[in-house]
Image (cartoon, helix red, strand yellow):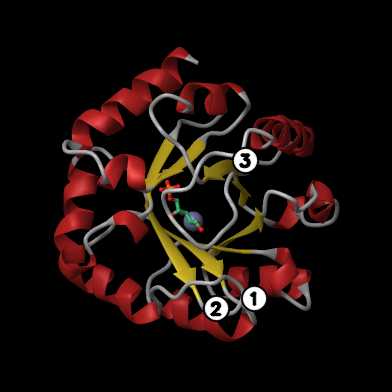
């Protein structure tokens, strides 16, 4: 398995001082910046777009930016995020009319594509896509809000996704998003995740470095 990646979701950061928050969390040992894009259409909330991604790059952020698109339609906004400095771009297959086309569009735009699975979305969307993507993101909450409770059925789904990835032989990352905390991240790692999104657990803690270090200890012990 690839080395663990901790990807704090900036949804729970203080947006009034976003650049400093991202600097702080990376300084505290985070690997990626998880960037949640919501459109008040595919999900019932509205967040941030390419301008904010570009602003973080201009601010000097060089870490990978993991753009999680919770938008429909998908394709219109992909080149904008590529131009804004996104590293990974993931999307929900239900939100795209032509999933394979969207994957190719992300790749052709110079970014790394990934598919996102809602709690009730079956993994069969991987049947003909796993050879073309770099990331599988399983949602362990319903998308739209930070601070929700982890849905336990995500653990069996992680194990199944891990099996599929191993069978493919490709270096595809397996990411979990929603309700990840210090006290469940070990079980999540054991189930097969190697990339961990955490919003409220990190940004809601008084000491980002201590929380990230604790998460890494739990993952290593898993
Ligand atoms: C939910 C977002 C998540 C969310 C995670 O739609 O995709 O990234 O911010 O937040 P926590 O870790 O607080 O559940
Ligand atoms: Zn997310």
Q: Which residue is mark 2?
A: 78
N-terminal label among 1 and 2: 2
* Residue 14 coordinates in the image, percent (x, y): 21, 60
Viewer-proximal residue among 39 and 58: 39
Q: In 3D space, how far apart are the residues under numbered discs 1 and 2 (Cα atoms)? A: 7 Å
Q: Which residue is mark 1?
A: 105
Q: Residue at x 38, y 77 (%)?
A: 84
CB-based contact (under 8 Å), mark 1 and mark 2:
yes
Q: Is residue 67 above or below residue 1?
A: below
Quadrant of the rendering where the N terminus is positioned: top right
Q: Badge 2: how crowded within 10 Å, few (<14), some, or many (20+)?
A: many
Q: Is residue 153 above or below residue 216?
A: below
- The residue mark sitting in front, 2 or 3, is 2
Which label belongs to residue 171?
3
Q: Badge 3: how crowded within 10 Å, few (<14), some, or many (20+)?
A: some
Viewer-proximal residue among 4 and 116: 116
CB-based contact (under 8 Å), mark 1 and mark 3:
no
* Residue 111 coordinates in the image, percent (x, y): 52, 66
* Residue 58 coordinates in the image, percent (x, y): 22, 73
Q: Residue at x 41, y 33 (%)?
A: 181
Q: Residue at x 34, y 72 (%)?
A: 53
Q: Is residue 31 visible?
A: no
Q: In 3D space, how far apart are the residues under numbered discs 1 and 3 (Cα atoms)? A: 20 Å
Q: Is residue 15 above or below residue 178?
A: below
């Amino acid at each position: 398995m690839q080395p663990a990646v901790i990807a704090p979701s900036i949804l729970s950061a203080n947006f009034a001082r976003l650049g400093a928050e991202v600097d702080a969390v990376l300084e505290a040992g985070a690997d990626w910046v998880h960037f949640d894009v919501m459109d008040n259409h595919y999900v019932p909330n509205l967040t941030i777009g390419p301008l904010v991604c570009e602003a973080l790059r201009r601010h000097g952020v060089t870490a990978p930016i993991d753009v999680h698109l919770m938008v429909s339609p998908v394709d219109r906004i992909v080149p904008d995020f590529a131009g804004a400095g996104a590293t990974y771009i993931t999307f929900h297959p239900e939100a795209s009319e032509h999933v394979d086309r969207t994957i190719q569009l992300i790749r052709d735009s110079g970014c790394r594509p990934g598919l996102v699975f809602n709690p009730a979305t079956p993994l069969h969307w991987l049947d003909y896509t796993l050879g073309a993507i770099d990331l599988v993101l399983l949602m362990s909450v319903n998308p739209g809000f930070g601070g929700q409770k982890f849905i336990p059925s995500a653990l069996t789904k992680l194990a199944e996704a891990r099996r599929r990835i191993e069978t493919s032989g490709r270096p595809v990352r397996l990411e979990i998003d929603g309700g990840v905390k210090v006290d469940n991240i070990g079980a999540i790692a054991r189930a097969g995740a190697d990339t961990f999104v955490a919003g409220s657990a990190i940004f809601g803690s008084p000491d980002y470095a201590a929380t990230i270090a604790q998460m890494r200890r739990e993952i290593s012990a898993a």
